[in-house]
Each structure stands twice: as C-alpha cells, then as structure tokens.
C-alpha cells in the first residue's frame, strides 16, 4: 500500500491482537471496516501494478485471450 505512514502487514498484525480485546460493537465494526478498506486498496494497487508491468513487458493480462490459443489465460482474481 502506498498510503504514507501505513504498513499493511503491521496494521493487520495489530488489528488481529486488538480485535480480541474489543467488547463494543462499534469498536469491532470500525476495525473490520478498516481491514476491509485495506484489502480493497491493496487489490486496486496490485491490479494497477500488474497492468503497468503488462504494458511495459508486452505480456497479456489475466483473463485476456492469448492469440492462437483459442481460450482465456488463467485469471487469478
């Protein structure tokens, strides 16, 4: 994740310890919302990076049909 000051692995490790100590629904929902946002952000950044690499290297994106194969390339999403 390229958000300044946020390390995804550290945040997930901290959240995994903290969530077991929370007792109020609003606190638990806040942590779960933040984890969900983190995963959505990470996924968008991974897809964007994959597209940049594909354009630079001339390789195909997962899910695109490769010329001459008659079928789709494996899609790992």
Image: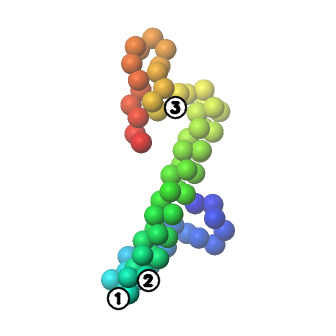
Q: Is residue 2 above or below residue 67?
A: below
Q: Is residue 24 above or below residue 67?
A: below
Q: Which mark is residue 47?
A: none
Q: Residues within 10 Å of mark 3 (few under 14, many from 20)?
A: some
| Local SS, label 2 | helix
Residue lying at the far top of the rendered structure: 68
| Local SS, label 1 | loop
- Residue receiving disc 3: 61
Disc 2 and disc 1 in contact, CB within 8 angstroms: yes
* Applied colour scheme: rainbow
Quadrant in which the C terminus is drawn = top left
Is residue 30 visible in the rendered image? The answer is yes
- The Cα atoms of the two marked residues, 2 and 3, are separated by 39 Å
- Residue receiving disc 2: 27
| Local SS, label 3 | loop
Residue lying at the far front of the rendered structure: 26
Q: Residue at x 38, y 82 (%)?
A: 25
Mark closest to the chain's N terminus, 2 or 3: 2
Comparing 32 with 76, the one in front is: 32
Q: Residue at x 41, y 26 (%)?
A: 73
- The Cα atoms of the two marked residues, 1 and 3, are separated by 44 Å
Judged left or right of residue 3, residue 72 is left
- Residue receiving disc 1: 23
Where residue 7 sits: x, y (%)?
55, 69
Judged left or right of residue 26, residue 56 is right
> To which quarter of the image does residue 14 belong?
bottom left
Q: How many marks?
A: 3
Judged left or right of residue 77, residue 49 is right
Q: Residue at x 43, y 83 (%)?
A: 27
């Amino acid at each position: 994740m390229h958000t300044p000051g946020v390390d995804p692995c550290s945040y997930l490790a901290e959240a995994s310890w903290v969530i077991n100590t929370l007792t109020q629904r609003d606190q638990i929902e806040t942590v779960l919302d933040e984890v969900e946002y983190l995963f959505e952000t990470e996924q968008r950044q991974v897809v964007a990076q994959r597209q940049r690499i594909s354009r630079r290297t001339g390789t195909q994106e997962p899910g695109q049909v490769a010329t001459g194969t008659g079928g789709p390339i494996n899609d790992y999403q």
